[in-house]
Image (cartoon, rainbow, N blue to C red):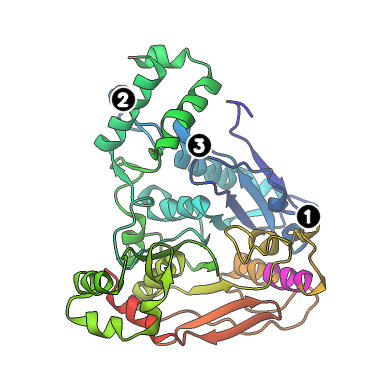
Amino acid sequence: MGEDCLYLNIWTNAKTGDEKMPVLVWYFGGAFQWGYTAEMEFDGERLARRGIVVVTVNYRLGALGYLAHPQLTAEQPDAPCNFGPLDQQAGLRWVRRNIANFGGDPDNITIAGQSAGGGGVMAQMASKSNEGDFQKAVMMSGLFKNPYVRNEFFIPRTLRDAEKLGVMLFDELGVKTLEEARKLDAQFIRRTYSDRMINKGMMFTIVNDGIFCTGDPLEGFCDGTRSRVPVMAGNTGDEFFEFIHAENEDRLKELAEKYFGDSAEEFLSYPEAHIQYGQGYAPVSAPEMGVKAAFLAESRMADAKPCYYYRFVPDIPGDDHPGTFHSVDLWFFFETLAKDTRPFEGRHYDLARQMCDYWANFIKTGDPNGYDINGNKLHEWRCYTDADRAEMEFTSDGAVAGVENSSYTKFLLDHVK
């Protein structure tokens, strides 16, 4: 760990610099606070064997990646904050300039990420300064929507609100000026931010600075102002459930009327609305809601781009009976199960190979369909649209194509604001 962190890693199977292979640029996750490119599951070898140049990009995190402060704004108004996303952008631009030397095609780039890395992909798609720099995008568990109340985490703060958090951090650090702050040890800044800010629920994240970021990336997706490229996105089955915070059925009814107005009675007619979860009712997957709401908005545009939805729901072995927890699908998409300590069996390796094949096809062409690494035709994966709400489920028995059959989910998507 160190301040000298702005590097990237490249896997290539090219023998010369003129092979024009498709390129994957990967942004890791970690809530914008943690993570690194060398996590074992991000080994790009299996994708490289499929004819893809894989690049994993490092970027600054936490206070050093997302700090805003009035003195910074005054000193560098053209780039006052968002250093983490700007690092991601710098990595992408480095790839554009240099990847041909590694056999890659600078005009066939897919940006992809998981969790906060998916949020980074959303931010890059929404930024007007990236137009034409990539041709496809993948967000794994990184696009969120709460159908009941506003989910603030992935909605950029205003610059002024972010600056207030920066002033608070300076107070915790015991400094008043940028000059004083720059003399501090980076590890001291990191520890102080972690102990005094994160542990109190005050995380630095992407900021609406009016330059790199000009609004909510999800809104940019839904209104068509994003970079209009084909997208693959989805979620695991057991991650990030939102619910209505109600202590009893009477309170549930009150909140349903608040959230859904004249449609509250219809909402309450669904058995799913009465499922108890945590401190409330009506659990629903926030990433599934986010992806599907965005894809429905895209499908209603005159020149709609292809959007492919997946859900990851196989059995995951282990004495802890983990379910399909957040991030577990990464071992499958990268086909790196052999590096994991869980007792995976043959069916898991078969699924990982299949998922990696779908991903590789999308990276190459913007369409996951086609053939696997052994030349076998893959099951058809249709786009998720308003007219055809097609899903691809990755199960213990492999990829299973289907259609959204939950009227409850359809109701929430029809009423989500």
Amino acid carrying label 3: it is Leu
**Percent from the top left, x then y, of residue 139?**
51, 61
Location of mark 3 (residue): 61
Asked if 309 appears above or below 140 in the picture, the reply is: below
How far is the residue under mark 1 from the one under mark 3? 28 Å
Disc nearer the start of the sequence (3/2): 3
Point 27% across, 85% down: residue: 266
The answer to whether residue 351 is magenta is yes
Is residue 201 something one can see in this rendering?
yes
Query: Most prominent secondary structure in the magenta stretch?
Result: helix
Amino acid carrying label 1: it is Thr
Is residue 131 something one can see in this rendering?
no
- Nearest the camera: 54 or 160? 160
Q: Which residues are magenta?
A: 348-356
Residue 274 location, quadrant: bottom left
- Nearest the camera: 194 or 349? 194
Side of 264 where 60 appears, left or right:
right
The answer to whether residue 200 is magenta is no
Q: Which disc, if any, is residue 295?
A: none
Residue 416 location, quadrant: bottom left
Q: Quadrant of the N terminus?
A: top right
- Nearest the camera: 384 or 369? 384
**Percent from the top left, x then y, of residue 14?**
77, 54
